[in-house]
Amino acid sequence: MLCAAVKLLPLLFLSILGSTSCPDRCRCFHSSDLVDCQARELTRIAQDVPEGTWLLDFSRNRLTEVQSNAFIGLWSLRILLLSNNSIQALEPQSLSSLQFLEILDLSFNRLQQLPGDFSQGLGSLLELRLRHNLLQHLSPPAMDKLENLRKLDLSHNALRTMDAGLLNALGHLRHLNLEGNELDALEDHLLTRQQRLEVLHLGHNNISLIESEALAPLRSLSLLGLRGNRLEHVHFRVFLGLRSTSSTYLQLALNPWTCDCELHRVFSKIQHVRYLKVEDYKEIVCEGPGPLAGASLALMDSQLCVAETSAVLVITITVVMGVVCALVKAKRNSSSKQSVSESDAQALEK
């Protein structure tokens, strides 16, 4: 009996040690392997986080950087929350040990760029949240190891352009949020590998141009958000490339549309395509030309081609009347000549 108790002592000691090992000012829930360090005024990431931690929450602190190897040894970590800090820099290899991480939240920080090795070791990542930072530019190496990523949120940054090939490694991406940036065009090369993309948010940028093949690779898209940009005109073939197996809903309001016959034809064609739906069609308002400013496109689109049709009709009638007059005149001239000829013949006979 005594021997059995002695054998159990080391196990009991390790159990007690494991249950009391917790970073200063944090709360540890060992039954669920959860470590809660949020809102503790922390300026550095603790080095004594239990190795078996599954979820680590350092949000709402005063972190300004993430140190190299800050999470070394945390092989079980699946969710890392670092939002609502003041993080300006991610040191080299700061995340490289998180080989099984699935969700990383860096939202509401002050990141201006991502290091070239940002994605190193993050091959299991499924969701990356980077909204509300100061990102102006992203280079392809920062994303090239995220081959399993399903959701990427880059909304409300300061992105003006996106390099060709930036998203090439993200072949499994389902949701991409680029809302609230400073993008001025959607170019052909950006989404070439996103055949599985289902939701694309591009609202509230400065987009005035969508290149003809920019959306063509998107075979699974169910929602395309383009509200609040600078679109005045758009070609029908841009949307015709969207050949989703189900309906694709378009959000196009809050743009400075120039309402003319050409725009009417574009929207008319879109609405006759079975798999395309303009979700906010009744909210689309004309920016111009002058007399049409503020008018609803849905209420007046059928009238936009009336002036053009009238002009064509007037020109057609004018041309037809001109031809008729010419024919009548020619006939009269012919009759007059024939009469003169007959008179001359009669005179000769006398």
Image (spheres, helix red, strand yellow):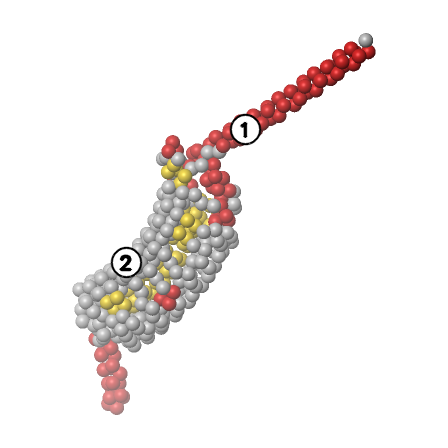
Determine the residue positioned at 26% across, 64% down: 82
Q: Is residue 299 left or right of residue 97?
A: right
Q: Residues within 10 Å of mark 1 (few under 14, many from 20)?
A: few
Q: Nearer the viewer, residue 309 or 24?
A: 309
Q: Residue furthest top?
A: 350
Q: Nearer the viewer, residue 20 or 140?
A: 140
Q: Nearer the viewer, residue 329 or 139?
A: 329
Relative image position of residue 245 (x, y in whole percent): 51, 53
Q: Quadrant of residue 35?
A: bottom left
Q: Quadrant of the C terminus?
A: top right
Relative image position of residue 88 (x, y in whole percent): 24, 64
Rendered position, 23 above or below 202: below
Determine the residue positioned at 36% across, 64% down: 139
Determine the residue positioned at 46% across, 32% down: 303
| Tag 2 residue | 134
Relative image position of residue 195 (x, y in whole percent): 47, 59
Rendered position, 4 above or below 58: below
Comparing marks 1 and 2, which lies closer to the viewer?
A: 1
**The label number, if any, that marks residue 315 in the structure image:** 1
Determine the residue positioned at 29% across, 77% down: 73
The span from disc 1 to disc 2 (Cα, nearest Å) is 57 Å
Taking the image as drawn, is residue 194 in sight?
yes
Three-letter amino acid code of the residue under disc 1: Ile
